[in-house]
Image (cartoon, rainbow, N blue to C red):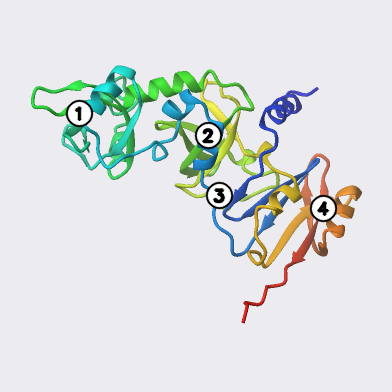
Amino acid sequence: MPAARAAQAEIHAAAQHQPLLCAAGVLFFHDEDIVDLYVHGVSPFLPLPAYIGAGIGGDLMNHMLPEGLHPQPEGYTREELLLAMQQRRVLQARAVLCDERHALHVPLGCCEGVIERAEGARGIAGGQTRDLAILSCVGRPVCFHVLGFFPDGRARLSRRSAQEQALDLLLRQRPGEILPAVVTGLAEFGAFCDIGCGIAALLPIDCLSVSRIASPADRVQVGQQLLCAIKNRDAQGRIVLTLRELLGTWSENAACFAAGELDFLTLEVRPSNAAALALYRELGFQPVGRRRDFYTDPTEDALLLTKTFKKEEPDG
């Protein structure tokens, strides 16, 4: 079995084809034909709290959530900070200031917390990470461990320590494990995602969709919450993500929408896939066009099929 096929089979076995909703529409998986449905009048990706509460164990819940998804109370008591320090539990609060020494200031309720420059991110002290990683935290939730207290009563915090703990757990995960992620940046070659306490992973453009897209922005946007599968690690040992293998069946995804939420769905399918064509026509899709040489390996046109939904008349 070719390496790519083997990796895909491994991910398939673990991921169980979770249905997935996206801002542009719904991605449908049918054998080797993936269908991009451009949906009008729907919300962005489903939020993650229900998944997190039901499917993630204690370590993952406490240490491996992206920044912004950890519990964030109005404030902490000193007793809560001391307990978190003893348990090495990750806490979260919003950074409001980066001072001239590039230390982050974080209000905690009972006191102010300070994340000194060297504790602001993995790699800062050694020069592998630029200070922009600290400056960009201002105004955003940040994760941290409590290291202790300064003589003036302020709490000494470490984002670096929380990141190293999260990375240690993340590197133990196998291909196919599903992780919550938050998109933090877009590039021509893919999307960067926070997969735990600010740890970055790449979601390559060819893993965002199984049909060709011009830009990652065609599928995701900064701040969007995703569920991704671990694909592999790159040459530097960094985690690489995929969405391709997390696509549900047509019926699974369609069931996520209530009547009246869609105007129409448009999908692409190989003309040679007679079984898929028969299924889609049975479900009410009609041919509306063709995209030349859309598919590769082998090269083939894509048939465009559309299903139009009737709007329900309001009562009265």
Which quarter of the rendered picture does the C terminus lie within? Answer: bottom right
Q: Within 10 angstroms of label 2, few (less than 14), some, or many (20 or more) residues?
A: many
Secondary element type, mark 4: strand
Q: In this rendering, is residue 21 above or below 171?
A: below
* Residue at the disc numbered 1: 78
Residue type pointed to by label 2: Leu
Residue beneath the point at 70% across and 53% down: 255
Dot 2 lies on which element? strand
Instruction: Tell me which label, 4 or 3, sits earlier in the chain.
Output: 3
Of residues 69 and 84, the one nearer the viewer is 84
Q: Amino acid under label 3?
A: Phe
- Residue under label 3: 45
**In this view of the protein, can residue 35 be seen by the observer?**
yes
Tell me the SS state at disc 1.
helix
- Eye-nearest disc, 3 or 1: 1
Q: Which mark is residue 202?
A: 2
The amino acid sitting under disc 1 is: Arg
Determine the image quadrant of residue 150.
top left
| Numbered disc in front, either 4 or 3 | 3
Q: Residue at x 66, y 64 (%)?
A: 262
For residue 123, say whether it is visible: no
Q: Residues within 10 Å of mark 1 (few under 14, many from 20)?
A: some
Residue 136 in percent (x, y) is at 32, 40
| Nearest-to-viewer mark from 2 and 1 | 1
Q: Residues at badges 2 and 4 in contact (C-beta under 8 Å)?
A: no
Q: Residue at x 25, y 39 (%)?
A: 75
User: Going by the image, does 145 lie left or right of 256?
Assistant: left
**Mark toward the start of the polypeptide (2 vs 4):** 2
**Based on the displayed image, in which of its 4 quarters is residue 30 positioned?**
top right
Dot label at residue 301: 4
Tell me the mark number nearer the camera, choosing from 2 and 3: 3
Residues at marks 1 and 4 touching, judged by CB atoms closer than 8 Å: no
